[in-house]
Amino acid sequence: MTRQEATHTQRIPLNKDRVLRTAVALADATGIDALSMRRLAQELDVVPMALYKHVANKEELLDGMADAVVGEIDPPASGPDWQRVVRGRILSARRVLLRHPWAARVIESRTAPTPAVLAYLDSMAGSFRDGGLSADLTHHVMHAMGSRLLGFSQELFDTSDPSGPPDPALAAHYPHIAELAATAAHDEGSTVGGGCDDQFEFEFALDLLLDGFEGLRRQGWTSARAKASHRP
């Protein structure tokens, strides 16, 4: 970088958008665990205290980073096929998370939904409602989808760091689990957050859920009738 370029860079005003964009790029490059206010300040060539004019603390920084990432998700497509619209939006969210591998963990760690996440979820609920799902069914659909609405599946256990072949003793005690583990073949390059959540697994579950929701819509499903049918 020339001295003139460096001077121009120094003159770029520091604002919240620049702080968040730089933090996202830094997390992409070094990982979320390496991100600190001090490291971010170094990247921006400012003193750490300058950051606190724009974000109150590390948690507010992470909130803003989550919102910045969610803001990259494509808007919903138009058309009468609600399943296509919802599926396309969710797969767009997944592509965003594949660009920012740290983001799913940050989104999960928030104690309350951030504004961009709330706006996204509101829009997704609107897509279900526009597709003819009742408010009652949409409520249950949103719960059933969970984190899949944002493009990732939550794993029961952390399987991102396998320690080698299954222990024969464990396989003897849990033969069905061992059998499933032996047949699993995951595309690590399409995995969000490690584990089994690769693209094929994700789309398999997504399509299964969306087809099931459409079946319930056609049946005129209501939670009241479903609860009544389960009463002794």
Image: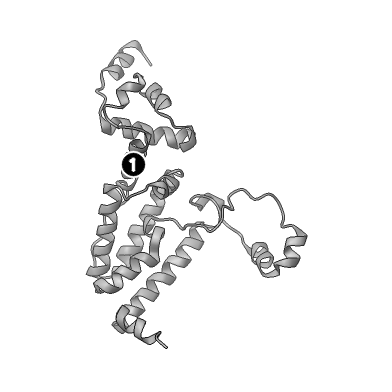
Quadrant of the image occupied by residue 43: top left
Q: Nearer the viewer, residue 166 or 101?
A: 166
Residue 13 vertical placement versus 66 (above, below): above
Residue 78 vertical placement versus 15 (above, below): below
At x 47%, y 57%, the residue is 154
Quadrant of the image occupied by residue 122: bottom left
The residue that label 1 is drawn on is 63
- Residue 128, position in %: x, y? 27, 68
At x 26%, y 22%, the residue is 12
Q: Nearer the viewer, residue 143 or 195?
A: 143
Say which amino acid is labelled 1: Asp
Q: Residue furthest bottom?
A: 232
Q: Nearer the viewer, residue 53 or 165?
A: 53
Quadrant of the image occupied by residue 129: bottom left
At x 42%, y 32%, the residue is 26
In the rendered image, the quadrant that contains the C terminus is: bottom left
